[in-house]
Amino acid sequence: MEEHFFTVKEAVLNNNCPECYNNNGLHLTFKQKFIETKWYKSITNETAQEIECRVCHTVIYPARWTDDIDRVFNYHQRAFKPKKTSIKLKKAAWWLIAGSVLVAAAIIATLLVWP
Ligand SMILES: [Zn+2]
């Protein structure tokens, strides 16, 4: 099984970076978890957020957030709408289902022919 987070929304924050004090480097990213297996692909309802400074290339963890960053983050989080969760069956799964249906039909047909 393969899992990864894909970016749903990205916002540029005008706050000062707690590391390098630059005020145009902070990027807030909202991500959502995606699972891919042999049988299906699925968008889950699990989300994650990250603030990264693109000037000093540092991930700013919540412990380092200033009150201003907190406020801006809350604002963006309220506006954030995750993608609808979904499951898409892959071809392998459809073949499996089709195969099972055929086998079931064959069994039923056999039972009807030989009472
Ligand atoms: Zn920085």
Image (cartoon, rainbow, N blue to C red):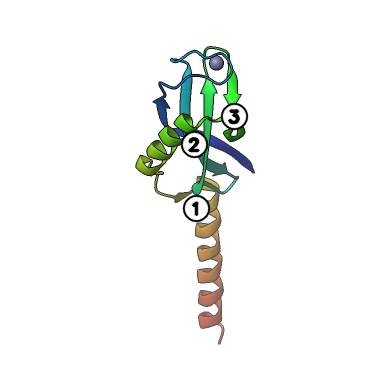
| Residue wearing tag 3 | 64
**Residue closer to the observer: 29 or 3:** 29
Q: Give the SS element for disc 1.
A: helix
Q: Quadrant of the C terminus?
A: bottom right
> Is the Cβ of the residue at disc 2 closer than 8 Å to that at disc 1?
no
User: Disc 2 versus disc 1: distance between alpha carbons?
Assistant: 29 Å
Place of residue 13 in the rendered image (x, y in percent of width and height, measured from the top left): 42, 24
Q: Residue at x 50, y 70 (%)?
A: 105
Q: Residue at x 48, y 21 (%)?
A: 26
Q: Label 2: few (<14), some or many (≥20) within 10 Å? A: many
**Residue closer to the observer: 90 or 3:** 3
**Left or right placement of residue 68 versus residue 93 in this view:** left
Q: Label 3: few (<14), some or many (≥20) within 10 Å? A: few
Place of residue 10 in the rendered image (x, y in percent of width and height, measured from the top left): 42, 28
**Residue closer to the observer: 44 or 58:** 58
Q: Is residue 53 above or below residue 65?
A: above
| Residue wearing tag 2 | 31
| Residue wearing tag 1 | 94
Furthest-left residue in this view: 79
Q: Marks 2 and 3: which is nearer the front?
A: 3
Does the beta carbon at disc 2 come under 8 Å from ligand 1? no
- Report the amino acid beneath label 3: Arg
Q: Quadrant of ligand 1?
A: top right
Q: Earlier in the sequence, mark 2 or mark 1?
A: 2
User: Disc 2 versus disc 3: distance between alpha carbons?
Assistant: 20 Å
Say which quarter of the image contains residue 71. top left
- Report the amino acid beneath label 2: Lys
Place of residue 60 in the rendered image (x, y in percent of width and height, measured from the top left): 58, 26
Q: Earlier in the sequence, mark 3 or mark 1?
A: 3
